[in-house]
Amino acid sequence: MSTPVFELVIRNALVATASDTFKADIGIIDGCIAQLGLGLAPGAREIDALGRVVTPGGVDAHCHLDQPMNEPIRMADGFESGTRSAACGGTTTVIPFAAQAKGQSLRAAVEDYHRRADGCAHVDYAFHLIVSDPTPHVLNAELPGLIREGYSSFKVYMTYDDLKLDDGQILDVLDIARQHGAMVMIHAENADCIEWLTKKLEAAGRVAPRFHANSRPMLVEREATHRAIALAELVDVPILIVHVSGREAVDQIRWARSHGLKVFAETCPQYLFLTAEDLGLDNSYMGARCVCSPPPRDKRNQEVIWNGLADGLFTLFSSDHAPFKYDAPEGKKPGGEEVAFRHIPNGIPGLETRMPLLYSEGVLGGRITLNRFVELTATNPAKAYGLHPRKGTIAVGSDADLVIWDERPVTIRNEQLHHDVDYTPYEGIKLQAWPGLTLARGEVVWDGQTFHPRKGRGQFLQCGQPSILPMSKKSSSAFT
Ligand code: DUC
Ligand code: ZN
Ligand code: ZN
């Protein structure tokens, strides 16, 4: 037997990237892809992928892990369980949020978040920032410094009392993003409309979880999406509208694109697989499990989201994993009580199910191509946040973050997932595929049956500038 050249060779893979599908062996050295081609020299270890699709490991560019909450609420997943769950679902890079509390320095928020992550993650991670208090010091000193240090994307909220910015503050943040080449993610819902509707519903005694959806109808999202687009147009800077839920926001984004504006859009599994009925048909509290914002809509809107995934409207497909236990005083029953919908923590788990849901129902269901799947789940998120080509593709020099897919029937059961949440909103959904193997920088983290832990394997990644063509509204092509 000849001396091994590679540490690991994946043989006979059907490699899928965002642009191509081809047969190749993948030779791995030092956690990176060293060679791609047929008939590669031997590896110290070999895995035969004959007849199986191999995609880049997923980049989940919108998830919340161990984000500080108001007492008694606490997120169920931190970096350990969150990245464990990610790995078992084929995701090898996560980008959660270092959130600034009002009055807090943004840098202090970043330092605190590093302490929460250090030595805990099983897969690589970067941070977005949440800017909730854009003081002159934050805007002019902290943000430019942090962008240079690899925190080049930040989320701003148009709703949530603790986080929301007014239009003038959003303009200030957009202006900094323009000057320093950062990406701004916008949570677009009109806070005043939500508050007005919530008070009306409360006055009528309509406080069960299902009324969460009534308090945030699509026009609330449509109006804020329209306003966010106008603010970005005024500053002349690209923006990303996150977690788009249905037709009305989609129409605004299509309008913006047709006028040459650089408006990118993200959607999430909950807008394909859940509807407002999952928040309950009666006054049962079980619907609290699916309370998230924007809320899931209806079947017709699911189709609109599928179409946007297929035709290029959406740039990113993320989980918005925001993990709260259902039956817990720190979760969906704050202090142990069944509370009115306004007090239910918003968010659902989804890190582990994001990739399999889209692969199975999107690719195998004939709704999107395999290459588009790769683009949405790995390549574009890596490009949008300056991690490409190290992440998000299968190419010589890229990290060996890979998923070998098993095409076999699987029924989603929470007991088989690896997060620390006591439910999944996707319980019982039948899929046709699941990751049969996940490699994180060349190490097997998931073999289709068993998770292979190594806390601290995951490294912090500095994000670069988005690889987007000139920051001008004149350019039409999204990514380089
Ligand atoms: N909505 C958000 O904006 N973030 C986390 C979860 C949610 O439902
Ligand atoms: Zn949000
Ligand atoms: Zn979110």
Image (cartoon, helix red, strand yellow):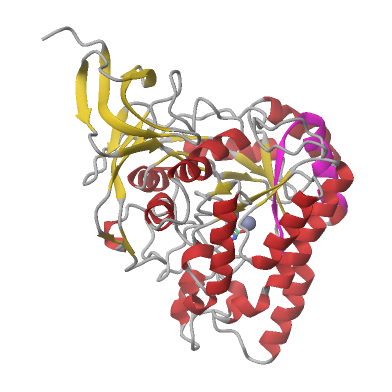
Front residue of 278/263: it is 263
Ligand 3 falls in which quarter? bottom right
Q: Residue at x 75, y 34 (%)?
A: 143
Quadrant for the C terminus, please.
top right
Relative to 299, residue 84 above or below: above
Report whether 475 appears left or right of 315: right
The image position of residue 128, as x and y in percent, is 62, 40
Report whether 103 appears left or right of 412: right
Query: Is residue 184 highlighted in magenta?
Result: yes
Total marks drawn? 0
Q: Residue at x 50, y 63 (%)?
A: 272
On the question of residue 292 being in view, the answer is: no
Query: Is residue 424 highlighted in magenta?
Result: no
The image position of residue 212, as x and y in percent, is 60, 76
The image position of residue 252, as x and y in percent, is 75, 60
Front residue of 210/246: it is 246
Relative to 125, residue 449 above or below: below
On the question of residue 63 being in view, the answer is: yes
Q: Residue at x 75, y 39 (%)?
A: 476
Question: In this view, which residue lies farthest toward the top?
Answer: 3
Quadrant for the N terminus, please.
top left
The image position of residue 195, as x and y in percent, is 74, 74
Report whether 314 appears left or right of 238: left
Report whether 167 appears left or right of 278: right
The magenta-colored residue range is: 168-189
Q: Residue at x 59, y 45 (%)?
A: 97
Front residue of 304/382: it is 304
Relative to 272, residue 13 above or below: above
